[in-house]
Amino acid sequence: MAAATDGSFLGAGISLRREHVADAFVASESIDLVEILADHYFARDRRTREALRALSERFTVVPHGLDLSLGSADGIERAYLGRLSGVVAAVRPPYWSEHIAFTRAGGRRIGHLAPLPLTHEALDVLCANVARVSAVVESPLILENIACPFDIPHAEMSEAQFLSALVERSGCGLLLDVANLYYNALNRKLDPFAVLAEFPLHGVVQCHLAGGHRAHGEWIDSHAFPVPEAVWQLFDEVARRAPLRAAIVERDENLPAFAELADEAARARAIMRRRVAA
Amino acid sequence: MSLIALQGALAALFTDASARERFERDAAGFARAFGLDARESEQIEAMSAGAIASYAATLGRKRRSEAARFLTRTREVAGDEFARTFEAWAARTPAVPGRFRAARDAAAFCDAFCRGGGLSASQVAAVRLDRSEALAACRPAMLRFFRTVLVQQAFGYLTRRA
């Protein structure tokens, strides 16, 4: 299997929500690719199969998993992996993505992405799970950093060191969520550019761009607002230093018109093209 | 011990309000109950209860955001109180697993909201309609298809008889 880092420039697009599907087809020339939430396409009915076929005929589609729980010491759920693998096979993507997190433990489903302790044991578990998944899903996997307002104490390494070791050991590329990096840094009163400088940018294949908000004294990556200027500046730096193939604009709340997201994707494309040309 | 025990303890803290209360009262006892070793106990005990509560609140907001699409009428009935009411309910109620999680959450919230009282008959009817639509969304597409066919056939039969 080719690595996700080896491949052509894909461009910029949006994380597709049902409210924008019709507009995306009408104005398909305004985006280069779409990311779909794989979990939304797990049904094995005709309508879902046709939706995946229609999407993959019109766009480059990148499936994005939410609940595989790659960091779970309990291991990977075979049934979930089977459904995920089916979605990936249906759209034949250049790569697919999941999170560096766990969403299930001790018989509980958390319903959200929970942070891993930055320890060698957690890294071993993650790499073992990635290897297991990669043996089943026939497309390269890229892994995303998550937003979390706190760290699990007694870390054995920094997040950047954890990610560097992960890239090295798993052979996976990274999906760098620039907004997550930005809000995590703000919540820890760190300089986002200093944090970024430590990240293994040579492994970054794709970026996520989104806007969050501040509530109860804490920054939340809510995907509810346009991409803020500070995140664009960080993205500019990533585009300059990383072998980026794509960028995806995410919005889950306060959904604007499709054209607004397409404009943000166009800005991301322009930044990446300028850097590629330079 | 192992990462399994640590993650189990963290999952309980993130999803269960009573676990968070036990942790706040006696962090060391909470860690022992999950079979954590000394080092993992230190990890758990060093965590800020405020940070954990804040993260749990994020989960509540996420559940609300996902369930809200099934709760159009309920949101109107609850008005400005919807977010607060849903998140308070979510803090007491563990999320249901499975791919229909949001729809099941929505239906369970409708039940709890009706049980809470203070609603007029028409408001209860509106919330129950949301509930039945949320539950319908949980049915596999094939069952929905057969149900539709059966309803159509029954309607045709009754129309012919009339």
Image (cartoon, coloured by chain):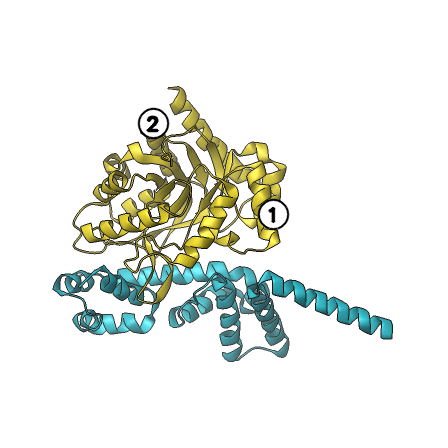
Question: Sequence order check: which comes first, mark 1 or mark 2?
Answer: 1
Name the one closer to the observer, A218 or B52: B52
- Tell me where residue A229 appears, x and y as whole percent: 39, 36
Q: Residue at (60%, 78%) from the top-left corner?
A: B120
Residue kind at label 1, given as amino acid type? Glu
| Crowdedness near tag 1: few (<14), some (14–19) or many (≥20) residues, C-alpha within 10 Å | few
Give neighbour class at mark 2: few <14, some 14-19, many 20+ (Cα, 10 Å).
some
Q: Which chain is cyan?
A: B
The chain that hosts pointer 1 is A
The kind of residue tagged 2 is: Arg
Q: Mark 1 vs mark 2: tell me if same chain.
A: yes
Locate the C terminus of chain A and report the quarter of the image it occupies: top left
Task: Give the vertical position of A53 relative to A246 (above or below).
Answer: below
* Chain letter, colour yellow: A
Which quadrant of the figure contains the N terminus of chain A?
top left
Numbered disc 1: secondary structure = helix
Front residue (pair B130, B51): B130
Q: Residue at x 27, y 60 (%)?
A: B51
Q: Residue furthest left?
A: B38
Could you tell me which chain the residue with mark 2 belongs to? A
Q: Quadrant of residue B43?
A: bottom left
Q: Residue A50: which disc?
A: 1
